[in-house]
Amino acid sequence: MNVVRYEPWNLLNQLHTEIDQLFTPQRRRTKEAGASIAASDWTPAVDIKEEADRFVITADVPGVDPKDIELHMENGVLTIKGERQSETKEAREGYKRIERVRGSFYRRFSLPDTTNAEAISAKSQHGVLEVVIPKQQKVQPRRIEVMS
């Protein structure tokens, strides 16, 4: 059985932080936090699968045009970011309700040293982004002949 430390003010501090985020404009929050933190309007669900010769990352990005998705690999970190555009619609009668989130997203994944960064490929089809990250070939042992 694990011992869980009770902190009575933890919930209140969390509520305070969430209220601050509601009333602080998105651009100012990003600027105050510094350039190393990117703000996201939504986060796509992601599956990561390891196979014998590759890793496969599958992300749900419905409504995102493939040209609006950026992939970067730097220092062992794969960055996926993009934006879902909104459609302009007018509601003349009654009310309208929008439940689909629009805006930018940003995800980062640390990859092991065994990945081959030069051979990463990606495709987007039917709202699903698939990123294939091949593994490097294993170095085969080599017999070294001793000369006399």
Image: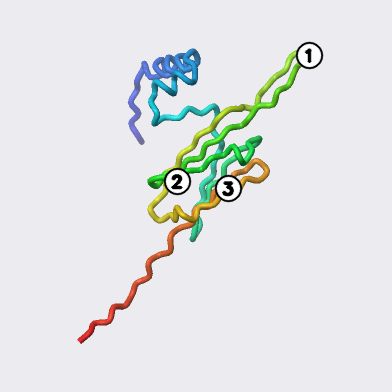
Circle nearer the N terminus (3, 1): 1
Quick one: quadrant of the C terminus? bottom left
Q: Residue at x 56, y 38 (%)?
A: 45
What's the amino acid at mark 1? Arg
Q: Residue at x 23, y 84 (%)?
A: 147
Q: Which residue is mark 1?
A: 92
Q: Nearer the viewer, residue 134 or 35?
A: 35
Left or right of 3: which side holds 111? right
Quote the CA–CA distance across marks 3 and 1: 40 Å
Circle nearer the N terminus (2, 3): 2
Q: Residues within 10 Å of mark 3 (few under 14, many from 20)?
A: some
Outermost residue, left direction? 148
Q: Residue at x 57, y 39 (%)?
A: 69
What's the amino acid at mark 2? Met
Left or right of 91: which side holds 29? left
Q: Nearer the viewer, residue 47 or 125?
A: 125
Please tell me the numbered disc located at residue 130: 3
Could you tell me if the residues under marks 2 and 1 are in contact, i.e. CB atoms within 8 Å?
Answer: no
Q: Which residue is mark 2?
A: 73
Circle nearer the N terminus (2, 1): 2
Outermost residue, right direction? 93
Q: Nearer the viewer, residue 114 or 4?
A: 114
Mark 1: which secondary structure? loop
Of tags 2 and 1, which is closer to the observer? 2
Outermost residue, bottom direction? 148
